[in-house]
Image: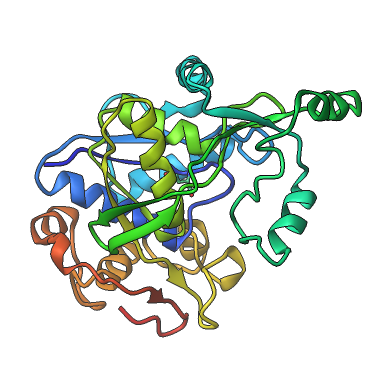
């Protein structure tokens, strides 16, 4: 019975894709009565807001999703993150990076660069090169000194997955701990045994598993849920129509109907069937979850 969690970023209302992932995470934990934690991933103070968090929690509750204990907030856990970064620094696994986003994008686009992966510009700077950048007024972020190796793990939905360890940011240059570090620290602190989340994070997982290992921790298991796509095959976004519970309510669609839509997309019921949470819970079978994206196209969305 792996305990689970959902960790939304409070950057806006949850859309059908987020709600569907939350439902899978909840069902996976709760169908066998395991613990479920709700954590607001609010480290980014610019894009996060408490008002968004409150609406997200209301939407989850109205779908019937519940959780154990108080809602957690990443912004309450700076001490934990600082301690973990301190340990990595002491082990010589951290370096200062002065790159701007633009410089990283340019270096990654160069012939040997890999888009989405830090190209290593600041990995081996000398003391005087660092001093020059600091004299220019650049504030460093802290990055993990990656190994250039890969990690393989078996994802409960995506199957065997291999990915390179990235030199991810551990502390941003404004001093705020970064998501890649925080998520590892929090999942271990919360005793999470199975992380169920959208498969846009599948490629980050090898680095997160590596980070947990460096800190002497056993990683949770992972199940990455295929994303919801719009009719063009792109990731679902707000502009794709009635994608939030508020949008759907404005069109006269009940929360129960949206729950049925999501459950049908997971192969748990038919579109025209009323289904309550208790029934969903008893029917849930992880081995039968879809392994491909759900293409959502209103009207006439198919389950
Ligand atoms: N907060 C992240 C998001 O909403 C998810 C983090 C996670 O589940 O690891 O995309």
- Residue 98 lies, in percent from the top left, at 76, 35
Q: Count up the numbered dots.
A: 0
Residue drawn where x is 27% and y is 67% of the image: 260
Name the colouring of the figure.
rainbow
Indicate whether 86 appears above or below 268: above
Residue 44, compared with residue 135, is above or below; it is below
- In the depicted structure, whether residue 265 falls above or below residue 213: below
In the figure, residue 203 lies in which quadrant? bottom left
The N terminus - image quarter: top left
User: Measured from the top left, where is residue 4 in percent x and y?
Assistant: 25, 40
Identified at 70% across, 67% down, the residue is 111
Query: Quick one: 15 or 1, which is closer to the camera?
Result: 1
Residue sitting at x 46%, y 59% = 200
Residue at image position (46%, 17%) is: 87
Quadrant location of the C terminus in the rendered image: bottom left
Q: Is residue 111 left or right of residue 290?
A: right
Left-right relation of 186 to 68: right
Q: Position of residue 164 (x, y in %)?
A: 45, 53
Relative height, residue 257 to residue 70 (above, below)? below
Camera-side residue of 245 and 150: 150
300 or 110, nearer to the observer: 110
> Can you give x and y, in whole percent of width and height, for residue 30 in the image?
16, 45
* Residue at the extreme right: 136
Pick whichever, 88 or 230, lies toward us: 88
């Amino acid at each position: 019975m792996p305990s689970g969690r959902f960790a939304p970023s409070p950057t806006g209302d949850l859309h059908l894709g987020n709600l569907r992932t939350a439902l899978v995470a909840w069902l996976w934990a709760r169908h066998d009565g395991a613990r479920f934690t709700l954590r607001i991933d609010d480290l980014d103070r610019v894009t996060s807001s408490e008002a968004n968090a409150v609406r997200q929690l209301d939407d989850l509750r109205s779908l019937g999703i519940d959780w154990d204990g108080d809602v957690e907030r990443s912004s309450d856990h700076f001490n934990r993150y600082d301690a973990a970064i301190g340990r990595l620094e002491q082990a010589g696994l951290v370096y200062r990076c002065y790159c701007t986003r633009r410089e990283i994008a340019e270096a990654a686009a160069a012939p040997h660069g890999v888009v989405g992966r830090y190209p290593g510009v600041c990995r081996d700077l000398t003391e005087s090169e660092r001093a020059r950048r600091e004299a220019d007024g650049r504030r460093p972020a802290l990055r993990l000194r990656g190994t250039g190796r890969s990690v393989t793990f078996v994802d409960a939905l995506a199957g065997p997955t291999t990915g390179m360890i990235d030199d991810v940011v551990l502390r941003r240059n404004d001093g705020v701990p970064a998501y890649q570090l925080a998520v590892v620290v929090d999942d271990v602190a919360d005793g999470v045994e199975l992380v169920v989340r959208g498969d846009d994070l599948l490629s980050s997982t090898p680095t997160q598993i590596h980070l947990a290992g460096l800190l002497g921790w056993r990683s949770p298991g992972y199940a990455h849920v295929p994303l919801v796509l719009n009719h063009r095959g792109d990731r679902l976004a707000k502009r794709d129509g009635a994608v939030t519970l508020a949008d759907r309510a404005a069109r006269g669609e009940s929360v129960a109907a949206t729950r049925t839509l999501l459950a049908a997309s997971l192969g748990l019921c038919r579109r025209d069937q009323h289904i309550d949470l208790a029934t969903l819970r008893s029917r849930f079978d992880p081995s039968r979850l879809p392994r491909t994206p759900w293409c959502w196209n209103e009207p006439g969305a198919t389950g």
